[in-house]
Amino acid sequence: IKPIYDLYKIFMDYPTDHGCLVDPLQEFVDTKQTEVIYECVPQSIIQGLALFKPNLENRKSQVISLAITVVSTGFNQAVSSIITDTDPRKRKKNKSSGYVGNSSFARTSAFCMLTVFTSIYNLLRVASYLLLINALGLTSVLVVLVEYILSLVALYLIKGDFYCWWPVSGKFSVVLALMVRLQVFF
């Protein structure tokens, strides 16, 4: 229900709520990206790992399920990109927005291309994780990923660039900074 409410706030041009750090559009995009990173990608990897099991009876349904997950992930990312690019307020403020034309054909074709390309990208990302897991084993890959993430966090701490630019403090600032850094990694 939250994504529907967020879209409603965007299309009705609600002002930013008092005490909120970001506007409704940025909140929607951040929510979608968080869903992709922490839900869709791990789900795709788990579904792909299930395909490697020998004697799997429902292999066809597993492939269809993985395809649906990859395409829905691409769709989520395309929605975030298109909404951000076609927002009239962002076009006025930011010169990097507005690459998609104003005609319905331009927006529809750009949206379809974004969905296809991000779906292919997600499929390649999942395939690379699966090949790595198949070659090294799940435990080795998890150890390497954890070591890599910890080294990135240490590097950001040494550089003094760990915290985000949002005006938050306390434990929430650490959690938010870690989430942003992990999203950039994945």
Image (cartoon, helix red, strand yellow):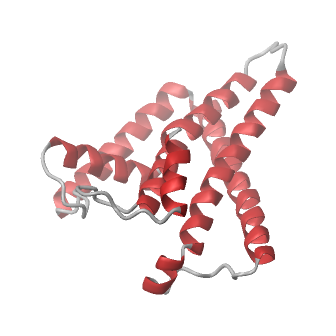
Asked where in the image residue 14 lies, by quadrant, the reply is bottom left
Give the camera-side residue of 79 and 55. 79
Q: Is residue 141 left or right of residue 22?
A: right
Would you identify the image quadrant in which residue 40 lies? top right
The one nearer the camera, 39 or 19, is 19
Q: Eyeballing the image, is 7 above or below 86?
A: above
The one nearer the camera, 42 or 81, is 81
Q: Position of residue 163 (x, y in %)?
A: 22, 57
Q: Residue at x 69, y 81 (%)?
A: 102
- The outermost residue toward the left is 170
Q: Position of residue 126 (x, y in %)?
A: 64, 42
Left or right for 162, reference 12: left
Q: Is residue 147 above or below residue 156?
A: above
Q: In which quadrant of the rendered view does residue 60 lie?
A: top right
Residue 146 in percent (x, y) is at 38, 37
Residue sitting nearer the eye, 161 or 136: 161
Q: Is residue 157 above or below residue 34?
A: below
> Percent from the top left, x then y, of residue 118?
68, 57
| Residue at horizontal 72 percent and vertical 65 percent from the top | 111
Q: Please report the residue visible at 42 percent of the width from the left and 55 percent of the height from the top.
A: 27
- Numbered circles on residues, count: 0
Residue occupying image coordinates x 30% and y 43%: 150
